[in-house]
Image: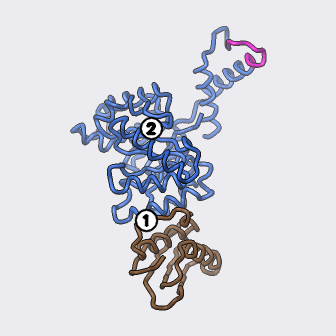
Chain colours: A blue, B brown
């Protein structure tokens, strides 16, 4: 299982951030060709991202490229740069329905064939930024075997919902979307990213939001600043008790496997496979913290 | 590729570089590189710039580079962007860009 707590946005045109983001060790880095790049610099940003994808320092980090929507003049050009640059994942913004994923998938397969990449190697993720996207989240999440995650993007979604972000509580305005996106991801057996937190100077507010996302079950969050990475990873760090329990579960599973037993038991109770998966994830998270 | 108009790419911010290109009547490539780290990395910067221009088959033109400590991948991308803009080229030959 891939650990995906942090997905750091890196503007595709920003040489400084492209040159240093790997230092902060996010689980995934997302080179942005969409909102962070002005129309007059899209061509240059595309080349920057294409070159950065091949930088050895990013080899250990999952490399995601956010392209422009395919119905814009930039979308397909961005996709060429991403797939030919061997991005691990292409992130489609403002996804409204499964047909958009099908169209994206066809273009990705065509480019993979043209550039000699194995067909199917490039994974896909969708950002859901509207009421329609939330309503169609299950269809989007299950639209392709290439899908590895869906992400809720709060800014456009809240505009679409005719509301704004509350800052002092449990963010009721995002509750339905968070729950819907998360359920869609889980039913498709893929990962889910919570919204980005815009105020980089408000650690308290950021951590409050991380707590909500973690408790709901999100794998992690989209991040807009490197300083949020350490805060997020710390918040996702398992407790000593959780680590100790996970170790016991894994030991029991290993022992059952060695003895050829089909059923794993711990303290007289049966341990289901999802509990073993969860224990492995806890240990992976502890090792990465 | 033939540079047919003046073009610019990049910035003067740290870790970036500014690349200016212009057409030339001379049948040769004139490349001027200024860098804050020219003593330590001048040869490497020159090698990356030359390789990038060779791959794009740029045989003539004036190319002026002001480097602010950019990584090789950034140098390559900025030179490519300036040349493609200077050539008025929309079509990319990805084999030449890698």
Residue lying at the far left in this picture: please name it: A162
Q: Nearer the viewer, residue A233 or A163?
A: A163
Whether marks 1 and 2 lie on the same chain? no
Element at label 1? loop
**Residue designated by label 1:** B91
Answer few, some or many: residues within 10 Å of disc 2's Cα (few below 14, many 20 plus, some between 14 and 19).
many
Q: On the rendered image, what quadrant is the C terminus of chain A found in? A: top right
Compared across the picture, whether B80 is left or right of A283 comes to left
Residue A61 falls within the magenta-colored stretch? no
Q: Is residue A110 above or below residue B18?
A: above
Q: Chain of mark 2?
A: A
What's the residue at 47%, 76% (across, down)? B19
Q: Chain of mark 1?
A: B
Magenta segment boundaries in residue numbering: A255-263
Can you say whether A272 is above or below A9 in the image?
above
As drawn, the label of residue A193 is 2
Q: Residue A171 lies in what quarter of the image? A: top left
Image x and y of residue B71, in percent: 57, 67
For the residues marked 1 and 2, what is the alpha-carbon distance in whole angstroms? 35 Å
Looking at the image, the residue that sits furthest to the top is A268
Left or right relative to A253: residue A90: left
> As drawn, is A125 to the left or to the right of A255?
left
Which of the two discs, 1 and 2, sits closer to the camera? 1
- Report x, y in % for residue A203: 43, 45
């Amino acid at each position: 299982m891939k650990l995906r707590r942090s997905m750091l946005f890196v503007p595709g045109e920003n040489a400084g951030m492209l040159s240093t983001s790997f230092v902060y060790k996010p689980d995934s880095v997302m080179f942005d060709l969409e909102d962070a790049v002005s129309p007059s610099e899209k061509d240059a940003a595309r080349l920057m991202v294409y070159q950065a994808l091949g930088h050895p320092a990013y080899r250990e980090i999952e490399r995601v490229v956010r392209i422009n929507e395919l119905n814009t003049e930039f979308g397909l050009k961005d996709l060429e740069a991403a797939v030919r640059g061997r991005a691990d994942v292409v992130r489609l913004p403002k996804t409204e329905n499964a047909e958009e994923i099908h169209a994206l998938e066809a273009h990705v397969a065509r480019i993979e064939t043209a550039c000699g990449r194995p067909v199917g190697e490039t994974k896909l993720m969708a950002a859901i930024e509207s009421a329609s996207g939330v309503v169609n989240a299950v269809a989007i999440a299950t639209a392709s075997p290439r899908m590895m995650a869906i992400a809720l993007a709060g800014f456009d979604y809240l505009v679409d919902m005719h509301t704004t972000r509350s800052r002092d509580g449990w963010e009721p305005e995002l509750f339905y979307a968070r729950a819907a996106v998360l359920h869609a991801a889980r039913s498709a057996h893929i990962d889910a990213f919570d919204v980005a937190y815009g105020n980089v100077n408000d650690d308290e507010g950021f951590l409050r939001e991380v707590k909500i996302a973690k408790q709901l079950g999100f794998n992690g969050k989209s991040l807009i600043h490197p300083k949020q990475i350490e805060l997020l990873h710390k918040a996702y760090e398992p407790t000593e008790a959780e680590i100790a329990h996970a170790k016991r579960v894994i030991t029991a599973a290993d022992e059952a496997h060695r003895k050829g037993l089909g059923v794993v038991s711990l303290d007289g109770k049966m341990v289901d496979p999802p509990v073993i998966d969860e224990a492995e994830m806890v240990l992976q998270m502890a090792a990465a913290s | 590729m033939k540079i047919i108009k003046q073009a610019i790419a990049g910035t003067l911010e740290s870790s970036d570089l500014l690349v200016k290109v212009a057409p030339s009547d001379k049948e040769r490539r004139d490349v001027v590189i200024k860098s804050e780290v020219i003593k330590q990395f001048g040869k490497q910067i020159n090698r990356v710039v030359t390789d990038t221009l060779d791959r794009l088959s740029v045989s003539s033109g004036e190319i002026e580079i002001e480097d602010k400590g950019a990584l090789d991948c950034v140098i390559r991308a900025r030179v490519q962007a300036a040349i493609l803009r200077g050539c008025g080229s929309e079509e990319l030959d990805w084999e030449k860009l890698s």
